[in-house]
Amino acid sequence: MLLNLSERVYQSKLSSTVGIADEVARLREKGHQVVDFSAGRAAEDTPSYIVEAAIQAMNTGHTHQTMAKGTTAFRKACSIKLERENNIIADPETEIIATMGVKQGLTIAMLSLLNPGDEVIVENPCFVSYHQLISYFGGKSVPVPLRPENDFRWDPEELESNITPRTKAMLFNSPHNPTGIVHSRQDLEVIADIAQRHNLYVITDEVYERMTWDGHQHTNLATLPGMRERTITIMGLTKSFAMGGWRIGFVYASPAIIRMMEKLQQHLITSCNAFVQAGAAVAFAEPPKPAVKEYWQNWQEKCRFATQTLNDVPGLTTRMPQGAFYAWTDIRASKLSSEQFSRRLLQEHQVAVIPGAAFGSVGEGFIRITCVKSWDEMKEGIYRIKAFVEKL
Ligand code: GLU
């Protein structure tokens, strides 16, 4: 008999987002006409000027490993972007590192911070992979509710009451997947105050930073007084530039943390792909081109279409997201659990969504709908949801 495999991995859950998207791919291969509102993957292809830059890089010998922390060109482009869009002056040599997407940024953030038993406060609901990424590296995630009655925001007293002598960091996501809230400056001031009084690090997942709607503004925690040294800012191009398959992002953090991450990248991945970094550098070096802005405009319109249409369905309540591109739909009136609702919707109407419970206990009673599919798919899927609920 062989020895047991890793208990930590064995005990961890499959990713609902990637798992359901994979299930959709299998069903489609068998000929089922499934509408895929599961993972947050946009229908659009990467804008051609970015693709061209990567092709040119491949044709001119950028087919080798790069520095573990990323090419100088990519890191410089990240610092130009940070200054232009975030008012952050970052040294590309010491404060920026390239990552293979945001999940890989989170991976090296956890590895850099955590000792066995360290606790990380996360939002409940939160992105499905946070708990796993924390536990794989010996940490413990401590979910603190974002209650619907509190507009999906942390209650400052409840947040603070979850801090223990083992708390190392807080991790939050804004604009927020799945609820669609954008943390206000006031929300960030609460986090900054607690972090400083309890000497904690804060990891901010800002992958949706470019997607804020109806005048809502994204603020970077790292720009608040006293937060530069203790904030690990994780950003990506995967969502905003429709570059999901490229797996590219970066971390902005203090030189001490970046040095740790550089060591990790040397051992974990050697480097991000050279030609991917070349394309990404072009995307960041200049202000987003009209083609990209059009995507964002389109995504906002699709979010509005989905939320408005769903709000006309008795028994469903959906708020226009302030940011990111998910409709977070309240299905409590259906009396079905989010898992039952999602299962039946897939089986009976071939529409894949993510059950809210996958994001944490507070997500029960909600489903998450990705609103960045083609217009045809958006309309078909939303009408099928309507038909499903009307017959319940
Ligand atoms: N972050 C996206 C989502 O929440 C993509 C899926 C994933 O990487 O897990 O659907």
Image: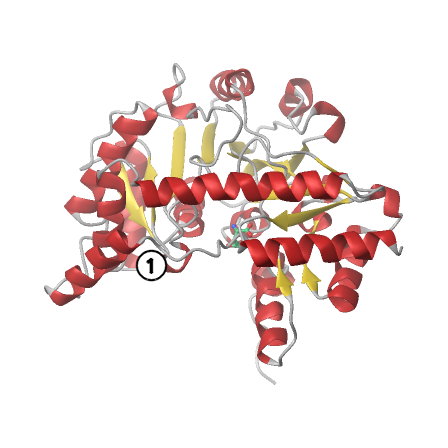
The residue where tag 1 is placed is: 268
Q: Is residue 381 above or below residue 119?
A: below
Whole-percent x and y of residue 43?
A: 48, 57
Residue 133 placed where, x, y %?
52, 51
For the point 30% across and 43% down, the residue is: 260
Between 240 and 304, the residue placed more toward the observer is 304
Q: How is the image coloured?
A: secondary structure
Q: Residue at x 32, y 51 (%)?
A: 264
Q: Residue at x 56, y 20 (%)?
A: 187
Tell me the quarter of the image containing the N terminus. bottom right
Q: Nearer the viewer, residue 386 or 342?
A: 386
The quadrant where residue 236 appears: top left
* Residue closest to the far bottom: 1
Identify which residue is drawn at 53% across, 27% down: 214
Asked whether residue 283 appears in the rendered view, the answer is: yes
Q: On the image, which quarter does residue 152 sit in?
A: top right
> As displayed, is residue 233 above or below residue 115?
above
Question: x, y percentage for residue 155?
Answer: 67, 22
**Badge 1 residue CB within 8 Å of ligand 1:** no
In the orientation shown, which residue stands out farthest toward the left? 60
Where is residue 62? Give x, y as percent.
15, 62
Nearer to me, 15 or 337: 337
Which quadrant would the C terminus be assigned to in this image? Answer: bottom right
The amino acid type found where label 1 is placed reads: Leu
Q: In the image, 61: left or right of 275?
A: left
Position of 311 compared to 181: left or right?
Answer: right
Local secondary structure at mark 1: helix
Q: Residues within 10 Å of mark 1 (few under 14, many from 20)?
A: few
